[in-house]
Amino acid sequence: MIHQQAAEIIRNADALLIGAGAGMGVDSGLPDFRGNEGFWKAYPPYAKKGLGFMDMANPAWFDDDPDFAWGFYGHRLNLYRNTPPHIGFEILKKWGEGMKWGYFVFTSNVDGQFQKAGFPQDRIFECHGSIHHMQCLAGCGNPIFEANSCEITVDEETMRALKPLPSCPSCGSLARPNILMFGDWGWDSQREEIQSTNYRKWLNSVPKGILVVVECGAGTAVPTVRYQSEQIARQFGGRVLRINVREPQIAPPHLSIPQGAAETLSTIDGKI
């Protein structure tokens, strides 16, 4: 019944905002970093040290122990490079392309899965940055650069990266991912600002009363995507379809669907 309701809402919408959090990638086989249990299951070496995700996602490691810092981010970069997006990405792209006023992606994920699924760069707002882009730690003025040429080898027993570590192509200093980490005052937000401008331009073009928000895998631990979904729905008089295995709760008239993204999107698509 709820999938049929969702299908009707999407069928009657003319603009689509896609919200995506950490749970979106789980159906692609990516690790679940929500909570230390999931993180430690994916990375036993950190469990032995008692280090959680928030401990590791800290820019201080790049100053204190860059091999350890790049062990964490290098492993993730390799994982994201090698993981194909699940069917749900293709479905969302099809829905968005079929709407009169188009679509936009607002995601807290840094994995680049939407780009890998064929979404154009100018339709994506990665509010926490991207692991596929890097910045100079020395602040030499070199702009953010792509990580395509960086190959990082990680010793999975120690989770330490082997040298050479990624470096700035301009000054040769150590580079870091262009990701907003916890307690991060050194993040270069230039790329995010461009994406934010594109996002706002799109929102300004969308009439009221025609938008639907499809939110996938966005939890409450880092509630950025959830807040954005609800705010935009209020602003535009739209409805939110919140798809989340663990934390699907949302008040009517929005829909709460306690399932994974790939299964739910496939089921809804079959009813449109």
Image (cartoon, helix red, strand yellow):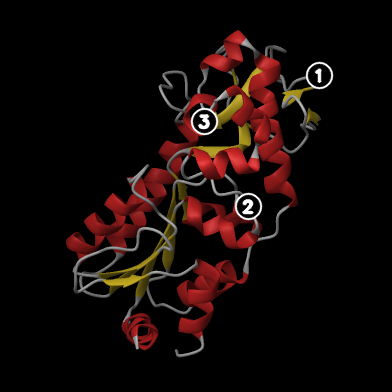
Say which element carries label 2. loop
- The answer to whether residue 55 is left or right of residue 238 is right
- The answer to whether residue 266 is left or right of residue 133 is left
Q: Earlier in the sequence, mark 1 or mark 2?
A: 2
Read off the residue under disc 3: 52
Q: Earlier in the sequence, mark 3 or mark 1?
A: 3
Q: Amino acid at mark 2?
A: Leu
x then y, percent, for residue 163: 81, 18
Look at the image and tell me in which quarter the N terminus lies. bottom left
- The answer to whether residue 162 is left or right of residue 197 is right
Q: Amino acid at mark 1?
A: Pro
Residue 68 figure quarter:
top right
Residue 97, above or below 82: below
| Residue found 19% across the figure and 72% down from its top | 252
Calculate the distance from the C-alpha at mark 2 to the C-alpha at mark 3.
17 Å
Please indicate, yes or no, whether residue 6 appears anywhere in the rendered image.
yes
Residue 217 figure quarter:
bottom left
Q: Earlier in the sequence, mark 2 or mark 3?
A: 2
Read off the residue under disc 1: 164
Q: Amino acid at mark 3?
A: Gly
Calculate the distance from the C-alpha at mark 1 to the C-alpha at mark 2.
26 Å
